[in-house]
Image (spheres, grey):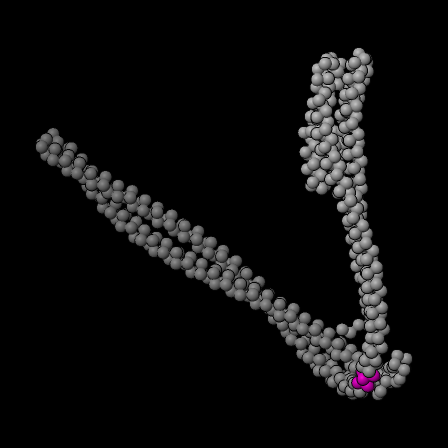
Amino acid sequence: MNLNINHKVGALAASAILVIGLLTFSVHREFVRLNEAGEAVIKVFQSLQHHANADMMHDALRGDVMSALHAAQLRDTAAITLIAKENAEHIEIIQAELKENQSLVSAGPVLTALEECKPALTAYVESSRTMVGLAGKDLATAEATLPAFTKAFGQLEDALGKVSELIESEALKMRDEASLEARRFRQILFGAAAVAVFLIILIGVLVARSIPRPFMAIISNLTQTAETNAGASRHVTSASQNLAKGASEQAASLEEISATVEELSSMTGRNADHALAGKSAANSARSAAEAGAEEVTRMQASMSAIQQSSQEIAQIIKTIDEIAFQTNILALNAAVEAARAGEAGAGFAVVADEVRSLAQRSALASRETAEKIAAASERSAQGVQISDSVARGLTQIVEKIREVDGMVAEVATASREQSSGLQQIRDAIFGMDKMTQSNAATAEETASAAAELSGQSDELKNATARLSLLVGGRAAKA
């Protein structure tokens, strides 16, 4: 891995910080364990103190009972009352001390022994409370109950003695563990310090030995780079001169292309204007065709109305013909009846004959009118068909004109887009022309800079020689 001096010094510092951190972590961990062991010892000794207080209250309860019996023998009621109050206080203290022990002790055997003490403690406390109560009321019964109280006292004393022995054993064990943790803490502290010092010295030596070697490699690379730069600068000078010449020729070609594109853009703009004019004319034609189609539609509606009126008139003529036929039949019947009547019906026969003649003329006129109306209705139907055909033709014309209008609009849009594209091409060519001219100037400047780079390469070789002499005590080989 290639590292500079800053990285190597940083690695040394990071290594030192890491070692110190590990040392601190180890020391802290051991210190915590030592502190925990000390706290455990403190808790055990506090438990011993509480147990001693409980043992004292155990004896105090027996003293309360004896004092109550003595006061009862003396018939001192006030003393018995005071003793009963002190007995209640002693009972509360012994119970509190043993309960506090249960919260302090964590060893299993001690907790088991404390649990075993509870029945004996309960029996002893109740017995002492009973004895003090009986002393003020019935001395004989109290004296008779004294052996049972003494037995309860002995049982509780044995249980408390067992707890005391277990707590003392746990205290000795905690003390030994604390001493062991203290010795381990000192060993880890001294060992970690020795390892840290060794690692720091080792890392320092390795970094100190590795610093000159990369310097010499860098100096060699710098020397080769300087020689390469000198040759490359000469090539760059020649290439820059050729580039300047080619850029000048390219600029002239771009000017000709720009003029051609300018002319093409002007022609495209005129085409766009013509397309817009054609689009306007197509819109006018479409509007006229649509208006004509609307007129033909109205004419078609009128022809349909005429045809419907002809049909209604034909129906009326048919009704008149039927009336004439019925009138003719009535005239015939009237003539028959007049013939039967003889001379009396002669005048009626004349009238019937005239009515018959009128009915025949009416039938003839209705038939002629019906024929003419039928002919007119037929011609109206033909007119409706012709108007339908004309309407369909105008509809097709309108659709075609709309298609032409859409095509002209697309042509106009394409012409505008083409004109815009040519404008962008012209702008791009102008930009290329400017860039080409700028490149020609830059090429000339590059040729000058390459010449200057050649001189700087010589200076770089001299500098690497001095750096090699400074680092390794000898000049770098060319």
Residue 65 drawn at (x, y percent): 77, 21
422 in relation to 183, above or below: below
- The majority secondary structure of the magenta stretch comes to helix
Quarter of the rendering occupied by the N terminus = bottom right
Q: Is residue 328 among what the camera can see?
A: yes
Number of marks drawn: 0
Is residue 310 part of the magenta span, yes or no? no
Which quadrant of the figure has residue 16?
bottom right
Is residue 224 part of the magenta span, yes or no? yes
Residue 277 drawn at (x, y percent): 59, 65
| Residue drawn where x is 81% and y is 84% of the image | 224
| Residue drawn where x is 80% and y is 17% of the image | 70
Q: What is the span of residues highlighted in magenta in the rendered image?
A: 223-228
| Residue drawn where x is 83% and y is 69% of the image | 202
| Residue drawn where x is 76% and y is 28% of the image | 58
Q: Is residue 212 left or right of residue 116?
A: right
Which is nearer the eye, 31 or 229?
Answer: 31
8 in relation to 137, above or below: below
Quarter of the rendering occupied by the C terminus = bottom right
Q: Is residue 28 among what the camera can see?
A: no
Residue 329 drawn at (x, y percent): 17, 38
167 in relation to 91, above or below: below
Q: Is residue 143 left or right of residue 381?
A: right
Which is nearer the eye, 220 or 263?
Answer: 220
Residue 162 drawn at (x, y percent): 72, 36
